[in-house]
Amino acid sequence: MDLLALLPAFVAAVLLISASPGPAMALIFRRAALHGLRAAVPTVLGLEAGLYVWALCAGAGLAAVVAASQVAFVVLRIAGAVFLLYLGIKAWRTAWRSRTSSEVEEAAVVSSSLSGQGWWKAFGEGVVVMLANPKAAVFMIAFYPQFVPADRPLLATTALLAAVQVLIETAFYLTLAVAVGRAGAWFRRPRIRRRLEAISGSVLIALGLRLATTAR
């Protein structure tokens, strides 16, 4: 079957995947709600950069090696779980500390998230969350071959499809960030901010524990 004929099904599948709850959605929602659209952009780009790397690894056969290796799979799973737990505990600590912080201090936290260092930190968080998830490797191996015609080169076609997925997901997540960011003033009220930090921290910790205890 021609690649163009498979493209509508691929786009529909990507949209369903993008809308599924998970670490990516939790990170983007938290960044957009607490720091606005500009702060959510590097998180989105980091996640998509990590996704593209996994897609290229799948096309080159490296993801299959990771998925087949018990040691590599466990190492990545634990690393990903630990990082999600770290982000969740960090959000809890922020919620606890904000109980005694002033509005001036909270404003300083928001402004610092928009600095160059904060931009790269958010980008790096997105990359690590995606790359340290061995489930992403297993998913890529199962997902992309369905849309690669037998007469097409695997790596080049996977790279092309991954680029399409990155564009779709980036547009989807940035639209979500815009929608959430518009309510940013409400989310950044001290009481609401504390609750959101506590809830998002709980979600990230739950996702970390699920990743740590989930088998292949």
Image (cartoon, rainbow, N blue to C red):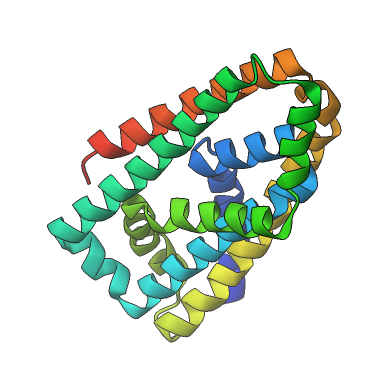
Res 74 seen here:
yes
- Please indicate whether residue 20 sits to the left or right of residue 74 in the image: right
- Going 20% across and 60% down the picture, which residue do you hit? 72
- Going 35% across and 47% down the picture, which residue do you hit? 80
- Going 24% across and 34% down the picture, which residue do you hit? 213
On screen, residue 101 above or below 78: above
Q: Position of residue 129 (x, y in %)?
A: 45, 50
In front of the other: 42 or 14 = 42
Q: Based on the displayed image, in which of its 4 quarters is residue 136 positioned?
A: bottom left
On screen, residue 101 above or below 55: above
Q: Position of residue 182 (x, y in %)?
A: 85, 34
- Going 56% across and 18% down the picture, which residue do you hit? 96
- Please indicate whether residue 157 sits to the left or right of residue 99 in the image: left
Q: Position of residue 100 (x, y in %)?
A: 65, 15
Q: Position of residue 172 (x, y in %)?
A: 70, 49
Q: Based on the displayed image, in which of its 4 quarters is residue 67 positioned?
A: bottom left
On screen, residue 160 above or below 13: below
On screen, residue 85 above or below 94: below
Q: How many marks?
A: 0
In front of the other: 120 or 67 = 120
Res 169 seen here:
no
